Amino acid sequence: MTLLPGLAAAQEVSRERIVTGLNKLTAAAPIIDVEVLRQEALNSGGAEMSGLPNWSKIEKLPQMVVEIDFENNSVAIEPRSYRTLGMIADALHHPNLWAYKFLIIGHSSSTGGEKRNLELSEQRAAAIREALATTFAIDPGRLYAIGVGQSFPIPGSDSKAAANRRVQLINLGIFRK
C-alpha cells in the first residue's frame, strides 16, 4: 500500500496502519542489491521508477510513504517527527513484521542542486535508519538506506513541491542473520 503525501496527512498514521500496509507481502521478494538500485537511480535520466528494471521489482512490494520533517537543508530530524518514527518502530517490533527487512528510501524536491539533493536524501535516509536502530532498538541488519535525490518526483507533481521531500519504507522480505 502506498500513501501519497496528501493522503498520508489526511489519514492518521498509526502502528496498525503501518503493520497492515507493510505486511502484505504475498510472494517471495526479489533479491535486491541496494548499490545497483542507487546506480540505476543516478543513471535514470529522469525515467520513471517503474521503467527501471530493478526499481520496477520493488515498486510492487508492500510499502508506505511517510512524512518525516527535517530542519531545512539538514539531516536533523524535527522533534515532531519522532512520533511518526516511534510508530514505525512499534510496527517493526510487531510479531507480524519481525521476520522482514526494510529499505528506507529518501527523496528530495528539485529546489537545490542535483548533487546536493542526492547527498541530502542519502544522509536523511541514513539518519532515519540510525534513529530506528539506536533510539528505537530495531536490528540495524534489518534496515537498508538509500537516497535517490530528485530522481523520482511524485508523478504529475511539480518536482519542486515539498511533497517530493518524502521517505518510502519498503518490505524487502525475509530477514536472515
Image: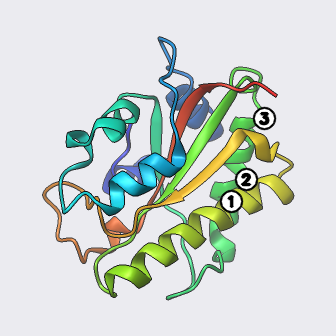
Q: State the separation of the CA atoms marked 2 and 1.
A: 5 Å
Give how far across and how far down residue 151 sits, in percent: 29, 63
Q: Are marks 1 and 3 in contact (CB under 8 Å)?
A: no
**Quadrant in the picture for residue 42:** bottom left
Cα–Cα gap, marks 1 and 3 = 15 Å
Q: Is residue 140 above or below residue 173?
A: below
Work out how far the residue at label 3 is from the one at label 2, CA to CA, in angstroms.
10 Å
Going by the image, does 92 lie left or right of 167?
right
Percent of width and height locating residue 120: 50, 77
Q: Amino acid at mark 2?
A: Gly
50 to the left or right of 87 = left
Q: Is residue 10 visible?
A: yes
Relative image position of residue 112 (x, y in whole percent): 34, 87
For the residue labelled by badge 3, is the local secondary structure a helix, a strand or a loop?
loop
Write down the residue under mark 1.
83
Mark 1 Cα shell of 10 Å, populated few (<14), some (14-19), many (≥20): few
**Mark found first going from the N terminus, 3 or 2:** 2
Given this view, does label 1 or label 3 mark the residue nearer the observer?
A: 3
- Total numbered labels placed on residues in the image: 3
Q: Which residue is mark 2?
A: 86
The one nearer the camera, 33 or 77, is: 33
The residue beneath circle 3 is 93
Q: Which mark is residue 109?
A: none
Q: Amino acid at mark 1?
A: Arg
Is residue 135 positioned above or below 149 on the image? above
Q: Kindly state the secondary structure of the residue where label 2 is placed.
A: helix
